[in-house]
């Protein structure tokens, strides 16, 4: 191995900069958080797993169930197809037992988390039509990715709102596939993301049609029963705002019945419950630690 290069020398620490192969990282770590882009992550993850480390993958490479869907939405052949459909999806509120026994966890997409957590218990109840689901989500600029582009340049996005990737956003199949596990059939979801002039946060308004008339109390009871005892999902009576969850790992959910439709509103911090906080929660599940460790 080449001699480490000292990156910083000062009063507090010497930080060596090392060029480590994935196999070496896997041998030296108990768990690896893979933050590589899609396709790049799936090239590295098998080598890290083979070396003995567990992996929480932030990319989309292991979220979907099959190679054909991945190819359709990401435009690439998947480099590790054997793990598609068998990798545990990293929402502990829904898949805690599976996560605890896993070596690889697919960290959810931020928009997907804000839609799946409200939808899963409602669809599981059997009271709602799975062919008519609309998810309208507003996200802060950090939710639109880190790649510099005109639409996220401050003078362009400040004091402005805009929809993007209408009908083409890659979290659509993720939402459909995970919700389908609670429905027995593939739901049809129209998902529209919108860019809001704020740094962080996601507010999703989800429209579902009940098969028979339901009351607001009925819907709220379904949500409360599903998430009773969950530390990071709060079913609230008021209409939640993104400021209620900023810098936290909470997802706040409420519901209203309007003209025969049920509107479910959820909000979260896309950088915490929608990304790094979810990864820490998954890490805690993987290693038998309290899920709140490092988060509360």
Image (cartoon, grey):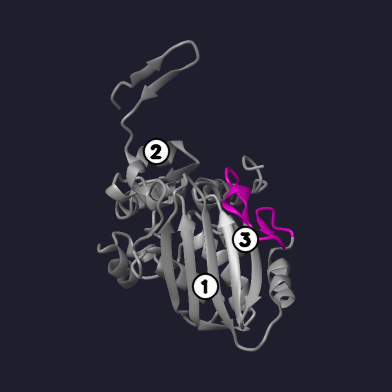
The answer to whether residue 291 of the structure is visible from this angle is yes
Label 3 crowd (10 A; few <14 / some 14-19 / many >=20): some
- Magenta part, dominant SS: loop
Residue placed most toward the observer, 179 or 65: 179
- Whether residue 250 appears in magenta in the rendering, the answer is yes
Q: Which mark is residue 179?
A: 1
- Vertical arrangement, residue 229 with respect to residue 122, above or below: above
User: Looking at the picture, how far across and down is residue 165, in whole percent?
Assistant: 34, 63
Q: CA distance from mark 1 to mark 3?
A: 13 Å
Q: Look at 34% across and 28% down and name the residue there.
A: 18
Residue where numbered disc 3 is placed: 93
Q: Are marks 3 and 2 in contact (CB under 8 Å)?
A: no
Mark 3 or mark 2: which is in front? 3
Q: Would you say 1 lies left or right of 265 here?
A: left
Where disc 2 sits, the SS reads helix
Dots 2 and 1: beta carbons under 8 Å? no
Residue 124, image x, y percentages:
61, 77
Q: Find residue 212 and name its label.
A: none
Q: Which residues are magenta?
A: 229-251
Vertical relation: 285 (above or below) 216: above
Q: Which mark is residue 25?
A: 2
- Classify mark 3: helix, strand or loop: helix
């Amino acid at each position: 191995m080449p001699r480490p290069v000292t990156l910083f020398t000062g009063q507090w620490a010497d930080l060596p900069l090392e060029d480590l192969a994935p196999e070496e990282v896997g041998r030296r770590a108990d768990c690896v958080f893979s933050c590589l882009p899609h396709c790049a992550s799936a090239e590295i993850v098998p080598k890290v797993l083979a070396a003995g480390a567990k992996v929480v993958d932030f990319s989309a490479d292991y979220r979907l169930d099959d190679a054909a869907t991945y190819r359709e939405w990401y435009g690439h052949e998947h480099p590790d197809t054997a793990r598609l459909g068998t990798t545990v999806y990293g929402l502990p509120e829904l898949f805690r037992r599976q996560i605890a026994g896993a070596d690889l966890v697919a960290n959810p997409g931020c928009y997907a988390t804000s839609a799946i957590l409200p939808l899963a218990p409602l669809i599981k109840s059997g009271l709602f039509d799975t062919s008519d689901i609309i998810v309208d989500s507003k996200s802060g600029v950090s939710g639109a990715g880190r790649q510099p582009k005109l639409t996220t340049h401050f003078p362009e996005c400040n004091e402005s709102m805009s929809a993007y990737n209408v009908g083409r956003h890659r979290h659509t199949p993720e939402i459909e596939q995970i919700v389908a596990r609670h429905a027995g059939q593939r739901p049809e979801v129209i998902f529209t993301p919108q860019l809001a002039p704020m740094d962080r946060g996601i507010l999703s308004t989800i429209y579902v049609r009940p098969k028979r008339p339901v009351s607001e109390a009925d819907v709220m009871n379904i949500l409360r029963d599903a998430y009773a005892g969950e530390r990071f999902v709060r079913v609230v009576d008021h209409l939640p705002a993104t400021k209620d969850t900023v810098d936290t790992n909470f997802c706040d959910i409420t519901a209203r019945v309007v003209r025969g439709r049920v509107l479910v509103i959820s909000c979260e911090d896309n950088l915490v419950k929608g990304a790094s906080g979810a990864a820490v929660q998954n890490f805690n599940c993987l290693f038998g630690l309290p899920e709140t460790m490092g988060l509360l």
